[in-house]
Amino acid sequence: MKRILEICCDSVASAISAFEAGADRIELCENLAQGGVTPSAAKISLAKAKIDIPVFVLIRPRKADFLYSDLEMEIMLEDIRQARALGADGIVSGVLNADGTIDAARTRQLVEAASPLPFTFHRAFDMCRDPLASIGLLAGLGVRRILTSGQKPTAVEGRDNLRKFAREAGGKITVMACGELLPDNIAAIRDIEGLSEFHSAARMDIASRMAYHGGVNMGDEAVMEEFRWQEVDAELVRGMKQQLQG
């Protein structure tokens, strides 16, 4: 069984680093610090032009919950159409109802808008009320895979649930494990029966090359956060690939 490593990237530079380090697939997004939102058209286009592995595009209009207004749904559907036109190889999204159940009607809309591209239901799954029942529901809606940490903060903590989810999926839908996976812990879930896909951000800090640091922040973070960000760490990607092949 071939094990697939998907790397979540919020920049084209990160996508290139992940590709060169041996990633099998990219999930492209924006602003990972807030859980990821929809990337720009330029990022999708350039990622497709510069790397030679599948690029799946996250469709998420804002941070926070997965309960969306009619306008937000309209935006998501248009973002899917644009991502397809730009060459996306897959779509990653998801919608919940206020009671924590899967919003089947809206998820079906997203899956149909993405078709024929494969659709991943993202970590909204980890916030749903009844995960075991939701697996069959999502498979019936045409969702190809579910991204999950086993409804725990990390995949290692969620491994018992990941085992249950993979068993419930039973080949009808792919369960892709995520949640702070790194070279030193991915082996703890690598051999769970039914798991063959793994997802990680694999990031490192990047320091700004600015010599002068002004005293004004551009957002909600402290001033010094304006002078650091994160990109994919190629060594972490290589390390996870080695562990998955072991």
Image: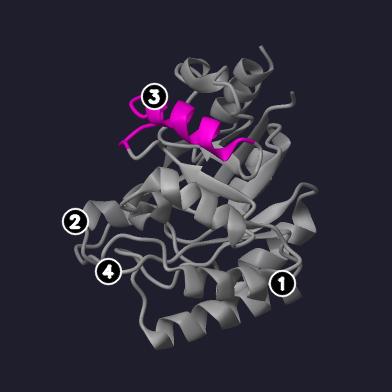
The residue pinned by badge 1 equals 84
Calculate the distance from the C-alpha at mark 2 to the C-alpha at mark 4. 33 Å
Few, some or many residues within 10 Å of mark 3 (<14, 14–19, 20+):
few
Dots 2, 4 in contact, CB < 8 A: no
> Which label's residue is closer to the chain start, 3 or 2?
3
> Which label's residue is closer to the chain start, 2 or 4?
4
Name the residue nearer the viewer: 76 or 50: 76
Q: Report the residue at 76% width, 54% height from top.
A: 50
Inspect the image, locate mark 4, and give the three-letter code of the amino acid beneath it.
Answer: Ala
Dots 3, 2 in contact, CB < 8 A: no
Few, some or many residues within 10 Å of mark 4 (<14, 14–19, 20+):
few
The residue pinned by badge 3 equals 160
The tag on residue 222 is 2
The residue pinned by badge 4 equals 98
Name the residue nearer the viewer: 24 or 118: 118
> Which label's residue is closer to the chain start, 4 or 1?
1
Dot 3 falls on a residue whose secondary structure is: helix
Decide if residue 221 is in sight here.
yes
Looking at the picture, does residue 12 appear above or below residue 38? above
How many numbered marks are there?
Answer: 4
Q: In the displayed structure, does residue 86 sit left or right of residue 147?
A: right
Calculate the distance from the C-alpha at mark 1 to the C-alpha at mark 2. 37 Å
Q: Mark 1 or mark 3, which is nearer to you?
A: 3
Dot 2 falls on a residue whose secondary structure is: loop
How far across and down, in percent of the image, does residue 176 sit?
55, 39
Inspect the image, locate mark 2, and give the three-letter code of the amino acid beneath it.
Answer: Ala
Q: Report the residue at 27% width, 52% height from top.
A: 225
Give the image quarter of residue 158: top left
Q: Mark 2 or mark 4, which is nearer to you?
A: 4
Q: Report the residue at 71% width, 64% height from top.
A: 88
Q: Mark 3 or mark 2, which is nearer to you?
A: 3
> Which label's residue is closer to the chain start, 1 or 3?
1
